[in-house]
Amino acid sequence: MNPVRIAVIGVGPRGLSALERVISHTALDGPPVELLLIEPGELGVGIHEAKQPDYLLLNTIASQLTIFSDTRMTPGAPVTTGPDFFEWCGERHGAVEFDDFLPRRLLGEYLQWAAGELLDRASGSDRLTVHHLRAVASSVRQDSDGATVTLADGAEHRVDLAVVTTGHGIAAGPPVTADGFIAMPYPLPDQVDAIAEDATVALLGTGLTAMDVIAALTVGRGGEFTEDGYRPSGREPRIVLANRTGWLPCARPATTRERRAAPAEFLTQSAVTGLRERSEDGRLDFRRDVEPLILREALGRMGSATAEETAAVKRILQPTRDTSPSYEQYVAELVERASADLREAERGLGTSAVKEGLEILRDHRDGLRAAVDPPGLTEESHRYFMREYVPLVNRTVIGPQKERIHELLRLIAAGVVVPGPGPRAELSPDGDGWVLSSTALDEPHRITVDLVIKANMDWPVIDPELDPIACSLRDWSAPGAEGALRLDRDGFVAPAQDSDGHRAVAVFGPPAEGASYYNHYVPSPGVWSRALTDLDRVLGPVLGTGRSTGSPDGDRSAQ
């Protein structure tokens, strides 16, 4: 019997999950399988390099990461068990708390170990043969009875199924361009090492990337946080923090080991299905149809919240175009808002009504996915969701750890970090440098800077150098909204020309963003995983184990 040939293209964390699912399914009866892992670097690691400095932290707590699977993660499907990240760290690095935000390098070490462990298990299988091709894939194309993967050296591999799990398309650029603009801050600290200590730097963005850059330019240069504040080393540049909204992101709240999301009442997949049935073409208007469900879900979660707490949640979920009389009053309000949010984060989930209300954007993000999944949103609404609402979700529940916000407020107090000139500040060249000008202050304010660091990521990356595979897919696939790939619900690429229903190329992880929603995460143990279930939906049929029908208990979402 000829083996089934499967290629996994790009083996970071999501590609490692694909390997784990293949191992799980090939433990059952079926045809022999030949698996090609196409990855030029170390398997599994992706952007989590083990040589990163310890001040670059994960934004997910230790107990919510795993590369293995259990029966809750993939109901009704085979599993490959193993230690999650928290357990693995406890065995090798001593005392670790379940809610620790650990150095990113430790996840890299775990991923390296998990890759070796999975390959060892695969080597003991009579049904599965694995080959690691240390090469870059330049293109993948569906054909009449499978797919062809072409490597950078011109070698071609015919497979029955190609699974694309490449990453963010991040590549290092020059440290500083001729006009003093750093378009890509990674890898850190290399990209910012050349910045002089007497420079003034504008940092565009206040999310997780910005927190990494700030850490590299402060504690990475010898500064120290103390009980009394921040003790500068004298090597820090002056950092001007600017973003579109003008406000700091919400801090991630404290949680408990036992916490599980309460079932959704309003933002459910069945509610989204009902809305589609009343739409002429099945597509939804996100603002009209979905945002009211989100608000009802958030307010319903808050119980007997005060009017002030309810207003705080509404202000975040329904932001207005804020203005301030002066720069000084704007800075005072920014510090007050961030301090109030930090107090709620320290109270934590289960105690803070505000954080419980906002957390529905994490707890029930599968309701958001259901709205984006085919047939999706109207064209205008999809544009709004990707450009406006996804950033809102990110700054509300996928923002920095509460410890990072606490540190940031200390840096502002020390004068090392300076807020930019309010919401929607304009950036323009100014001689040999740049200037940030206010647009939302009654008294205009300008801040001149020497350099600019772009700390927010554009998506999708449409660049044959940074992401050749995604660009090759666009050559033969049907066009998607806003530059995104067009995928069906199972993750298969929709070809531009009719292929009689034949599908042989599936896309998961960051390249699927836009066609789906929030695909760039490592699975969590003990809760239903859409990531693994979606992999099962495409792998199961070709492996002879059937199409997965596993789903979360009721409408409960976890990832």
Image (spheres, rainbow, N blue to C red):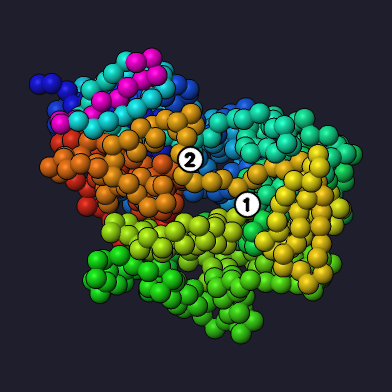
Give the residue displayed 58% in from the left and 34% down from the top.
106
In magenta, the rendered stretch is: 144-154
Cα separation between marks 2 and 1: 19 Å
Estimate the x, y position of residue 213 in percent, counting from the top left.
70, 42
Q: Is residue 461 left or right of residue 50?
A: left
Instruction: Write down the quadrant of residue 142 in the picture.
Output: top left
Q: Height in image: 285 above or below 102?
A: below
Q: Residue furthest front?
A: 431
Estimate the x, y position of residue 216 in percent, counting from the top left.
73, 38
Give the residue displayed 36% in from the left and 45% down from the top.
485
Q: Who is closer to the viewer here, 252 or 158?
A: 158
User: Is residue 64 at least partly visible in the picture?
Assistant: yes
Q: Which residue is mark 1?
A: 207
Assign a secondary structure to mark 2: loop
Q: Amino acid at mark 2?
A: Val
Estimate the x, y position of residue 161 in percent, counting from the top left.
24, 32
Q: Who is closer to the viewer here, 31 or 501?
A: 501
| Number of the front mark, 2 or 1 | 2
Residue 386 highlighted magenta (yes or no) = no
